[in-house]
Structure formats: structure tokens, C-alpha cells
Amino acid sequence: MCGLNTELIAHLHPPTQVISREPCVFPFTYDDVTHYSCISIHSDFDWCSLDKEFQGRWRYCTGLDPPQCVFPFFFRQKVFHNCTKEGYILNRSWCSLTNNYNKDRKWKQCSPQNT
């Protein structure tokens, strides 16, 4: 089990940290759970892994770290190559965070630029 060392992400006495410019890796696995966006487990602040399988390398998230849409993706009986409003009760566009929404059920609302 790859447990996050709470000393590394202690919000009361954080270690001196060089701000990484490395991109977050999505999805990433932490404690045998796959995450498709930044998480706040063991922290008051959102963070992400810098590796597909968490190896202790991480950084705090910023507003520039949202998960990205995956295209094409499969939803119901169709393949989508762009954001869609289909199936969203509020008539807003959305996209899948994996290539098979039917299986994984991970999604996000699209931005005006459809990203």
C-alpha cells in the first residue's frame, strides 16, 4: 500500500517545498483508489501526484490543474469527439474524464472553450 506520509502534507507545519512546475498526472492512484482530479486527503489543500502510481512525489494544485476531457469517449450507445449536452439535466455541456463514461462514470463540466 502506498500511503501518503502525513508529514509530507501536513497543513499545520508544511515542509519547505520547492514549487514544482511538473504537471499533475491524471488519473493517478493513491491508496489503491484512482483519482481523476486533485484531492485533499490528509491535507486542507488540494494536491496531486506527479506519478501515475503515487510514489511520494506530489505538489499542491493550482487553478491551472483541472483534469482534461478525454476524446473520444463512449456514453450510452454513442462515441463523442467533443463536449456534449446529452444526458445532462441542466442542459450544460460536459465530457468524460476517461474513454468510457458508461464504465467509469467520471466527468466534468466543459468550459466555454470545451476543454
Image (spheres, rainbow, N blue to C red):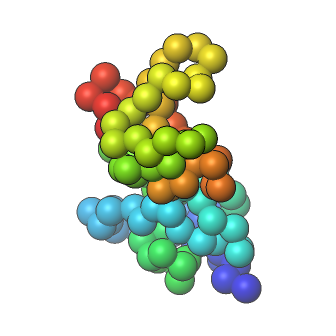
Quadrant of the frame with the N terminus: bottom right
Q: Residue, x 40% and y 62% (percent of image)?
A: 24
Q: Report the front residue among 100 and 50.
A: 100
Q: Position of residue 109 (x, y in %)?
A: 48, 30
Residue 57 placement, left or right of 81: right
Q: Residue furthest top?
A: 90
Q: Is residue 87 left or right of residue 78?
A: right
Does the image show residue 65?
no
| Residue 90 appears in view | yes
Q: Nearer the viewer, residue 56 or 105?
A: 105
Asked if residue 7 is positioned above or below residue 61 in the image, the reply reads below
Where does residue 112 sit, x and y in percent of width and height? 31, 23
The number of callouts visible is: 0
Q: Residue at x 46, y 61 (%)?
A: 26
Displayed quadrant of residue 100:
bottom right
x, y percent for residue 34: 63, 65
Q: Residue at x 44, y 45 (%)?
A: 79
Relative to 44, 61 lies left or right: left
Report which quarter residue 115 is drawn in: top left
Residue shown at 70%/60% (left/top)? 42
